[in-house]
Image (cartoon, rainbow, N blue to C red):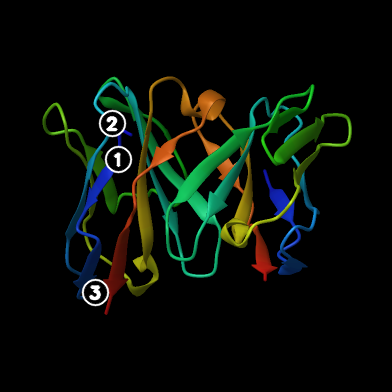
Amino acid sequence: EPEVTQTPSHQVTQMGQEVILRCVPISNHLYFYWYRQILGQKVEFLVSFYNNEISEKSEIFDDQFSVERPDGSNFTLKIRSTKLEDSAMYFCASSEGQGALVGYTFGSGTRLTVV
Amino acid sequence: RKEVEQDPGPFNVPEGATVAFNCTYSNSASQSFFWYRQDCRKEPKLLMSVYSSGNEDGRFTAQLNRASQYISLLIRDSKLSDSATYLCVVNSGYSTLTFGKGTMLLVSP
């Protein structure tokens, strides 16, 4: 079964440092997403990406965040200057059609710990 | 604010029991509804979409009541492997999904 692959599985970083979380979506999928889940809380939308541009973003996705599809396979989330409250599980997802209509396939996540 | 509300549980049931979860959503414009399953510290996995006419997938039955903005999930003949958190999910935009906090199910032998 096709998978969304995320690396690394766990990243520890110092406050103020930049991090890049990497994702390889399913190859024929056209829509890409980042969500996060703070421990014990609900899964929250960050950003959606289609046709090489952001299609929607939440209020969480401020100027510290950016996304990029640097080549035909990778989809990255960059946090420029990490804060303690950025500690969370970050999930990448992809969908063949509009995900809000068909549901997503999520990757296994990157656990980000900011110290 | 667009919210999805669920009873957090936990629901403790013996193997073989039937259990039902409910969920309410606030955005009357929502068009798509899903149940996801999430195991501890793992990613959410799509369990089933929910249609107005109701739908069934094996032991799982989902119902939608648009007038009451209410979604339900029924699990029959519970298995130990059904132990997980069940997430009610509703579309809240062109491409975005809003997740509930989830209902935890614990199935015991």
Chain bearing tag 2 is A
Left/right placement of residue A111 relative to residue A73 reads: right
Asked if one can make out residue B58 in the rendered structure from this viewpoint, the answer is: yes
Q: Give the Cα distance between marks 3 and 2.
A: 32 Å
Amino acid at circle 3: Met
Q: Position of residue B4 (x, y in %)?
A: 69, 48
Amino acid at circle 1: Val
Residue at (79, 34) in percent of width and height:
B63
Tag 1 near tag 2, CB within 8 Å: yes
Chain bearing tag 1 is A
Residue at (39, 70) in percent of width and height:
A85
Amino acid at circle 2: Ile
In the rendered image, the vertical position of residue A71 relative to residue A44, given as above or below: above
Q: Dot 1 corresponds to which residue?
A: A4
Left/right placement of residue B93 relative to residue A47 reads: right
Q: Dot 3 corresponds to which residue?
A: A15
Which numbered disc, 3 or 2, marks the residue that appears first in the sequence?
A: 3
Q: Position of residue B85 (x, y in %)?
A: 60, 59
Residue at (56, 50) in percent of width and height:
B37
Q: Give the Cα distance between marks 3 and 1.
A: 28 Å
Q: Position of residue A90 (x, y in %)?
A: 35, 55
Which numbered disc, 1 or 2, marks the residue that appears first in the sequence?
A: 1
Quadrant assignment, res A57 = top left
Residue at (43, 53) in percent of width and height:
B43
Quadrant assignment, res A83 = bottom left
Q: Which numbered circle lies on residue A26?
A: 2
Which mark's residue is nearer the viewer, 3 or 2? 2
Confirm whether circles 1 and 2 share one chain: yes
